[in-house]
Image: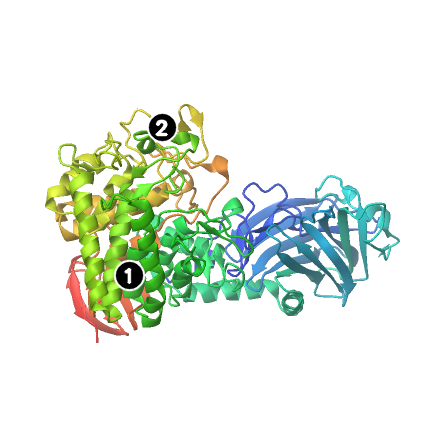
């Protein structure tokens, strides 16, 4: 096998800037304008709360004017963003910055000054933060108070939703001087001339202003400045670490800041990221795209992880993405539950569901969006049942099973009562947004004005499949909880839903599952990717294989070069170029390859290939390969990405949206199940059944599975023999075979 991978160095590149600490903070501006400015001026986030203009730094030379810095290089890794600058007109002075975000919700900039001259250099570093203060009659958001003490500036702000955040700004050495000034608003750019510094920094010292409650009106921009003095001897370097801690309480902000400035912030970020990567299974293979994407996916998940433990976020979870997607969103949480189930600690997987169950509405409906300070009453369809069972298969937990059972029962009852009043066994989609798949021909089949965001009724394949799997899951949970009567009832209800899917949604002539018109229960004939979702279940068999062979594998419909489109390519409203009725849209589902539906289809085809259509195994591997390979810039194996959607013919991503690392699908689970072949089960039979990806070798190690540690290794052992597939349990080899194939092991 190849040398062990260090994920931090392995993922290093020059064209990225996202940083996260895995708790509540994130620095991932979609369209950054000021990366070259020292510090964090572009928008950061604390949970769902935007935090623009946290701080920047100016390096002032002996003339009293800021030095002009020209960036020489940039290097990104998950743990830090490193930039090196030279001073215009003074090439003997070099400045290096390393931006990090620590798991204690601290944004830190470690500055290193290298003096390559024969004379000592005296420098002044001015740290500047620009906050906004609104003081209207109805309150509003913005800075409330600001205090300078203990060598730091402490301030707190009211944020949208009525919450309050506390911030602490300072460095790892005492400031020479500090100033706070209230000003009328100006441009909010990290320019020295815009700040108060040209007037307030004189003769190597800041005017010790504390001017906040001044002026004829108390609103405006608050300029916060701290001054540090640095002496760099000849041919030596000196460092200054500037840090801004953010928290939901003043005590926590102060404590986290104090801790950060007493440590090497870069070494701390490295250690925290390494600790995270040690808590997941190790994977590598001879396909560089699959290997790199596996580790990159885990970076993206931690980037969006939130463990606020307060407000509407009492449980650890994963936010859907960056920017406006910095929320716990039910449509994507189903994916996070599946992916994070493979972590050694299942708390993020469990929290992906528990957060929504804790805020369940009285009707039984689950909310669509949760933030620290805000929650809505919107709604998305999600496959809670199947993914909860997957989690319990990997990490059995009777307490978790008992905790989710009753709320999920109420959720199913809500669907029976309000989404299927006819008791047809098929469930209603009520608007184009709640499936997460707007602007799609499938809705026009029941209302030609569905794209106007009006109420509709459509018996959705996705909604109904999810409910079928939920009722199957509830039957399993009830049986495990010792409730046999309830288990039989949920099983009976699941049978009825399954029968309705096969009777009404399956069209044998067109060999496809379709949504149904609620008035007639007839298939609509609008071919969409969700039409393959029944293959995620035990409902399908050889009688339905035509949907896969003749529709999914059809290059005129879904078998496109860069993954399956969300709507069939032969539909009259299909567009690979993100256009709906001729207009480019942000979130069109009428033909783009969306990772969300692509991961569903990859899982569906792989399941069918392994259960009832073995001749499709190579195509299942090819679909996963196409899907993963598409999510790389220009097919460069060192530049993975994950945008909302892609052109299914060219692979062009929706870069115009700026939303990379969008956690709206699953990939880790596909790699573990189908590349390495580990199939979760609810008994103690360990099944390993990899698909053939034409790999020379692969290894999956330190998988925590049902109380054991499992390693799977494939590759050459003897040059005279075929490659060997070996399975180890708790460090001991339990089975092996030549070549790929199914292995079954009874766990001890």
Q: Residues within 10 Å of mark 1 (few under 14, many from 20)?
A: many
Q: Position of residue 712 (x, y in %)?
A: 26, 64
Secondary element under disc 1, as helix, strand or loop, is helix
**Residue 199: % across, % down:** 86, 47
Between 307 and 218, the one nearer to me in the picture? 218
From the image, which quarter does the N terminus lie in?
A: bottom left
What x and y, as percent, mark residue 348? 42, 62
As drawn, 179 above or below 422: below
- Image side of residue 122 versus residue 278, left or right: right
**Considering depth in this image, is 723 or 527 the residue closer to the camera?**
527
Q: Which mark is residue 575?
A: 2
Instruction: Tell me if residue 649 can be seen.
Output: no
Circles 1, 2 touching at the beta carbon (< 8 Å): no
Earlier along the polypeptide chain: callout 1 or callout 2?
1
- Tag nearer the camera, 1 or 2: 1
Res 165 quadrant in image:
bottom right
> For this rendering, which residue is in front, 598 or 439?
439
Mark 2: secondary structure: loop
Name which residue lies at 77% across and 46% down: 219
Please say whether residue 22 is visible from this viewpoint.
yes
Give me the disc on residue 389. Answer: 1
Q: Residue at x 28, y 74 (%)?
A: 731
The way the protein has been coloured in the rendering is: rainbow
Within-10-Å neighbours for mark 2: few <14, some 14–19, many 20+: many
Give the image location of residue 508, x and y in percent.
13, 36
Against 122, residue 570 (above or below) is above
């Amino acid at each position: 096998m190849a040398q062990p991978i260090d994920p931090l160095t392995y993922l290093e590149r020059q064209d990225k800037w996202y940083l996260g600490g895995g708790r509540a903070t994130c620095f991932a501006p979609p369209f950054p304008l000021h990366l070259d400015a020292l510090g964090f001026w572009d928008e950061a986030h604390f949970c769902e709360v935007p935090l623009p203009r946290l701080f920047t730094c100016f390096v002032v030379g002996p003339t009293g004017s800021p030095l002009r810095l020209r960036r020489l290089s940039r290097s990104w890794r998950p743990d830090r963003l490193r930039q090196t600058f030279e001073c215009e007109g003074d090439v003997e002075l070099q400045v290096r910055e390393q931006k990090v975000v620590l798991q204690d919700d601290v944004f830190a900039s470690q500055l290193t000054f290298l003096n390559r001259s024969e004379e000592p250099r005296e420098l002044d570093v001015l740290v500047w933060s620009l906050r906004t203060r609104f003081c209207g009659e109805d309150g509003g958001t913005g800075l409330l108070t600001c205090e300078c003490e203990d060598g730091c500036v402490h301030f707190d702000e009211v944020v949208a939703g009525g919450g309050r955040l506390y911030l602490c700004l300072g460095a790892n050495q005492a400031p020479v001087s500090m100033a706070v000034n209230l000003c009328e608003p100006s441009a909010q750019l990290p320019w020295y001339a815009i700040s108060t510094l040209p007037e307030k920094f004189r003769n190597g010292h800041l005017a010790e202003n504390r001017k906040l409650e001044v002026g004829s009106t108390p609103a405006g921009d608050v300029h916060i400045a701290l001054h540090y003095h640095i002496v760099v001897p000849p041919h030596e370097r000196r460092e200054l670490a500037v840090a801004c801690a953010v928290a939901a309480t003043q005590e926590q902000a102060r404590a986290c800041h104090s801790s950060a400035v007493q440590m090497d912030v870069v070494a701390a970020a490295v250690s925290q990221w390494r600790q995270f990567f040690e808590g997941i299974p190790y994977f590598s293979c001879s396909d560089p795209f699959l290997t790199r994407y596996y580790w990159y996916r885990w970076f993206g998940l931690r980037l969006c992880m939130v463990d606020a433990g307060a407000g509407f976020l009492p449980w650890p979870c994963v936010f859907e993405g960056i920017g406006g997607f910095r929320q716990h969103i039910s449509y994507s949480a189903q994916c996070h539950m599946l992916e994070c189930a493979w972590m050694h600690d299942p708390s993020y997987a469990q929290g992906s569901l528990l957060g929504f169950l804790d805020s369940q509405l009285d009707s039984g409906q689950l909310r669509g969006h949760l933030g620290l300070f805000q929650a809505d009453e919107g709604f998305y369809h999600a496959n809670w049942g199947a993914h909860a069972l997957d989690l319990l298969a990997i990490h059995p937990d009777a307490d978790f099973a008992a905790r989710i059972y009753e709320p999920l029962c109420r959720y199913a009852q809500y669907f029976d009562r309000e989404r299927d009043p006819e008791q047809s066994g098929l469930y209603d989609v009520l608007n184009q947004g709640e499936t997460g798949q707007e602007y799609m021909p499938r809705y026009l089949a029941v209302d030609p004005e569905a794209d106007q965001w009006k109420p509709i009724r459509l018996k959705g394949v996705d909604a109904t499949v999810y409910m079928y799997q939920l009722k199957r899951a509830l039957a399993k949970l009830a049986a495990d909880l010792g409730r046999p009567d309830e288990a039989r009832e949920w099983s009976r209800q699941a049978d009825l839903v399954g029968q309705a899917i096969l009777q009404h949604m399956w069209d044998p002539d067109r060999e496809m599952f379709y949504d149904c018109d609620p008035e007639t229960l007839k298939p609509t004939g609008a071919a969409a990717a969700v039409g393959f979702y029944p293959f995620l279940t035990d409902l399908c068999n050889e009688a339905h294989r035509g949907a896969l062979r003749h529709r999914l594998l059809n290059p005129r419909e879904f078998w496109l070069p860069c993954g399956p489109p969300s709507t069939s390519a032969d539909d009259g409203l299909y567009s690979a170029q993100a256009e709906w009725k001729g207009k480019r849209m942000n979130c069109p589902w009428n033909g783009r390859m969306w990772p969300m539906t692509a991961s569903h289809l990859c899982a569906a085809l792989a399941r069918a290939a392994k259960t009832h259509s073995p001749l499709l195994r190579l195509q299942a591997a090819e679909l996963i390969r196409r899907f993963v390979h598409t999510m790389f810039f220009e097919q460069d194996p060192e530049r993975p990405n994950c945008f909302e959607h892609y052109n299914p013919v060219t692979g062009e991503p929706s870069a115009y949206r700026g939303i990379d690392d969008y956690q709206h699908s699953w990939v880790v689970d596909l790699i573990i199940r189908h590349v390495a072949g580990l199939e979760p089960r609810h008994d103690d039979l360990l099944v390993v059944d990899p698909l053939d990806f034409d790999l020379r070798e692969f290894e999956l190690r330190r998988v925590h599975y049902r109380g054991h540690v499992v390693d799977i290794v494939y590759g050459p052992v003897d040059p005279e023999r075929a490659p060997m597939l070996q399975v180890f349990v708790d460090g001991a080899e339990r089975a092996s075979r030549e070549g790929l194939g199914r292995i079954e092991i009874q766990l001890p």
